[in-house]
Image: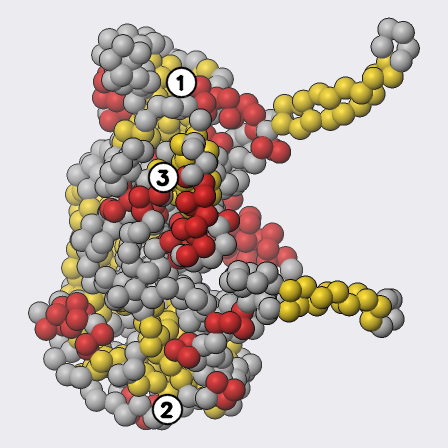
């Protein structure tokens, strides 16, 4: 017998956890122990001290509601653990987002492909219901009877279990293209234990945007040809609504649904061994020797009759299938990394998502600029990417550093795609800045403006991007402009933020009194009557000798999400070389959320109650544990914390929040090394607010980026990956 125990219910960080574990082990049963509710709960609670003390006990890590973010499946030490139960198992036991029958199979297929060994995906209450009612026996006596009613999602669960079940995930067949084709090995042979080669299952999903939020997905920018038209109409309806219009919620959902392809197809020639089913287990008939797989937001299953060699033939047929309905290429645009008069060039990356060669006409325009060879004929091999550089030959720099670009690739009969995106010149100016809250030192530094509404930044006056001018009175919130500089001693950052609800600041985290977040030794329960008069008071005393470990209120965390603060982040190390596995086996980097951030800092204003001023807090650096710096959380030998050699000023002037900071290069050795080598650095910033205004991010909605739970703290919230590249001027 195995007793499965979740360590998130254990009371305190280390001492109490160890005591409880010992009691369980002394019970004499074999124990499968896990950390649960989220991978960050496990890391915060058990590994926040930077050691692997608890790793020998961590048999599984169960995540909840981390879509496309199977973090436990990417931690090398967990994957390499040795012992009676082997590596740490990555489970998902409570992500109930597939509670309709059509979403069960695509949800489970993607979860299994992402490295999760055990998956849920469906709430049990959505699968069946139990009613109790009274019936009469033959003698007329009443009798209570309980009956189970199977609900529609149960059909999806049954089909998923039959077709996938305990089959091991093997690979994504088209790692560089579409559709999503998930290949599962056959069940083990009872005699040899090896997977039966012709018992495999193939799950095909045309568009994962029905099952998962599109912004989380690789290939998120590729839509169906007709879906693009529908999405444009839905986006126009959404844009016509005021920001506070209650109808925006329904319009946002309508836009997400309009983006899902619903009319694509994949046609393959298959011998008599191949069979096609929908995600509910219904067989779809062949047309002669041809199978046509619909490409939409649903899952379809391909199986064989198990005859020798039939699975290999099926996979070969899939590779040669005729795929129709998608936009032919994915377009990604790179910001300029040189001033326009210094050999600047626009880089356009095109990925042919189809399994056939493409030939098409590329046309590119950038507002106010002239490009060399803006029109050209390109040939792209199947499932391949190509980056084209288009030199800037003429044009005046934009004072706002905003360059609206339009890219169109017309592949004739294979369709056309048009992509629009606003670009920047991403240069870090070489300059020494006085950190005093006066942004006049930043005059001439290229602005990096972000806005809550797409296109809003292009409609602002010069007050939005000139560092020494405040925002206009009518700009209450939803806009920020940042400036970057450097010298031999510091990396400098400044921002001015439209904010008409100034905050007085919060605690100083270096000297935070952790005890105030827990219940005191003596507490009282007060009962009052309808008039508010106290009628009874009951005293409760914490047991003597037991540490007070129960929170009385939510802790203040230095990441500052939900406060008036700013976060910045750098990415310098490539996937697979940054302390995390690049991707689960059989997939590709970017299929799931992987590690993209190497250094992260928070700029926090300190309230007068806690001494005033401001504080720079290191949230992440190579070699530090991933954590959130909860009260009483143990420290690691190399850890996050206050940057005492840094400089920071934060203040409010009218409706403008001002942030000015300097971080010493000793904090950023890997960034400094790339600067010295003349290499680019990925960077982003995030502006948080204390009044439920949506955060502003430099990389939001950029074609190079996507939502990644682990991009920025808090590591359970959604942030955009730092993917835009910056070059440091010499």
As helix, strand or loop, the secondary structure at mark 2 comes to loop
Labels 3, 1: front one: 3
x 19%, y 77%: residue: 665
Q: In this view, does 17 lie above or below 174?
A: below
**Where in the figure is residue 502, as x and y percent of width and height?**
53, 83
| Residue drawn at x 44%, y 19% as measured from the top left | 162
Q: Nearer the viewer, residue 448 or 120?
A: 120
Which label's residue is closer to the chain start, 3 or 1?
Answer: 3
Residue at the far right: name it.
140
Q: In this view, does 311 lie to the left or right of 221?
A: left
Kindly identify which numbered label has been placed on residue 276: 1
Seen in the picture, residue 73 relative to 339 is either above or below; the reply is above
Alpha-carbon neighbours of circle 1 within 10 Å: few (<14), some, or many (≥20)? many
Residue at 83% x, 20% y is: 134
Which residue was labeled with disc 2? 437
In the image, taking residue 446 as reference, residue 108 lies left or right, namely right
- Can residue 172 be seen here? The reply is no
Instruction: In the displayed orientation, state which residue is furthest to the front.
Output: 544
Q: What element carries label 1?
A: strand
Q: How crowded is mark 2: few (under 14 residues within 10 Å), some or many (20 or more)?
A: some
Tag 3 residue: 59
């Amino acid at each position: 017998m195995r007793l499965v125990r979740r360590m998130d219910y254990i009371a305190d960080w280390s001492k109490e956890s160890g005591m409880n574990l010992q009691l369980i082990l002394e019970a004499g049963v074999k124990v499968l122990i896990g950390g649960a509710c989220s991978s960050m709960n496990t890391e915060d609670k058990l590994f926040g001290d930077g050691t692997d003390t608890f790793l020998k006990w961590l048999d599984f890590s169960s995540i909840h509601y981390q879509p496309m973010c199977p973090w436990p499946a990417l931690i090398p030490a967990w994957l390499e653990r040795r012992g009676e139960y082997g590596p740490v198992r990555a489970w998902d036991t409570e992500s109930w987002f597939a509670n309709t029958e059509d979403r069960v199979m695509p949800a489970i297929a993607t979860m299994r492909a992402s490295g999760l060994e055990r998956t849920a995906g469906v709430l049990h209450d959505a699968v069946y219901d139990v009613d109790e009612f009274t019936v009469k026996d033959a003698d007329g006596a009443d009798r209570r009877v309980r009956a189970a009613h199977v609900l529609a999602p149960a059909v999806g669960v049954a089909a998923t279990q039959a077709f996938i079940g305990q089959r091991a995930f093997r690979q994504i067949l088209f790692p560089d293209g579409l559709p999503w084709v998930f290949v599962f090995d056959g069940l083990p042979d009872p005699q040899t234990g090896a997977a039966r080669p012709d018992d495999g299952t193939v799950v095909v999903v045309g568009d994962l945007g029905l099952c998962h939020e599109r912004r989380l997905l690789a290939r998120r920018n590729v839509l169906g040809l007709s879906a693009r038209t529908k999405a444009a109409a839905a986006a126009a309806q959404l844009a016509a609504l005021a920001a506070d219009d209650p109808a925006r919620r329904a319009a946002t959902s309508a836009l997400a649904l309009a983006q899902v392809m619903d009319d694509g197809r994949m046609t393959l020639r298959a011998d008599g061994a191949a069979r096609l089913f929908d995600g509910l287990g219904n067989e779809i008939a062949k047309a002669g020797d041809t199978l046509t797989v619909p490409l939409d937001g649903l899952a379809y299953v391909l199986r064989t009759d198990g005859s020798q060699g039939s699975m290999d033939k099926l996979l070969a047929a899939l590779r040669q299938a005729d795929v129709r309905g998608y936009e032919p290429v994915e377009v990604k645009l790179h910001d300029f990394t040189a001033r326009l008069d210094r050999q600047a060039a626009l880089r356009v990356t095109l990925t042919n998502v189809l399994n056939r060669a493409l030939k098409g006409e590329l046309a590119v325009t950038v507002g106010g600029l002239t490009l060399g060879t803006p029109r050209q004929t390109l040939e792209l091999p199947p499932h391949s990417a190509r980056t084209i550089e288009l030199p800037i030959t003429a044009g005046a720099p934009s004072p706002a550093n905003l360059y609206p670009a339009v890219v169109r690739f017309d592949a004739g009969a294979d369709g056309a795609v048009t992509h629009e995106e606003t670009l920047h010149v991403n240069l870090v100016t070489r300059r020494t800045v006085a950190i005093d809250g006066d942004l006049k030192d930043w005059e001439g530094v290229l602005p990096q403006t972000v806005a809550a509404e797409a296109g809003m930044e292009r409609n602002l006056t010069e007050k939005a991007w000139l560092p020494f001018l405040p925002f206009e009175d009518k700009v209450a919130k939803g806009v920020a402009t940042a400036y970057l500089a450097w010298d031999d001693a510091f990396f400098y950052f400044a921002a001015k933020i439209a904010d008409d609800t100034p905050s007085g600041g919060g605690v100083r985290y270096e000297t935070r009194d952790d005890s105030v977040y827990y219940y005191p030794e003596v507490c009282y329960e007060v009962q009052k009557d309808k008039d508010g008069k106290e009628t009874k008071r009951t005293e409760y005393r914490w047991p003597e000798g037991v540490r007070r470990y129960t929170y009385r209120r939510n802790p203040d965390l230095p990441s500052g999400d939900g406060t008036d603060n700013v976060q910045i982040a750098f990415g310098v190390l490539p996937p697979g070389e940054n302390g995390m596995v690049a991707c689960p086996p059989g997939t590709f980097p970017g299929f799931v959320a992987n590690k993209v951030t190497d250094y992260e800092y928070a700029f926090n204003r300190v309230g007068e109650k806690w001494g005033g001023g401001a504080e720079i807090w290191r949230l992440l650096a190579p070699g530090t544990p991933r954590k959130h710096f909860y009260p009483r959380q143990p420290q690691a030998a190399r850890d996050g914390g206050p940057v005492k050699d840094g400089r920071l000023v934060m203040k409010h002037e009218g409706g403008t929040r001002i942030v000015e900071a300097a971080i010493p290069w000793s904090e950023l050795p890997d960034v400094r090394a790339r600067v010295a080598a003349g290499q680019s650095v990925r960077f982003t910033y995030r502006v948080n607010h204390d009044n439920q205004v949506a955060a502003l991010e430099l990389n939001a909605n950029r074609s190079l980026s996507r939502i990644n739970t682990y991009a920025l703290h808090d590591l359970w919230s959604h942030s955009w990956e730092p993917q835009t590249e910056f070059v440091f001027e010499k």
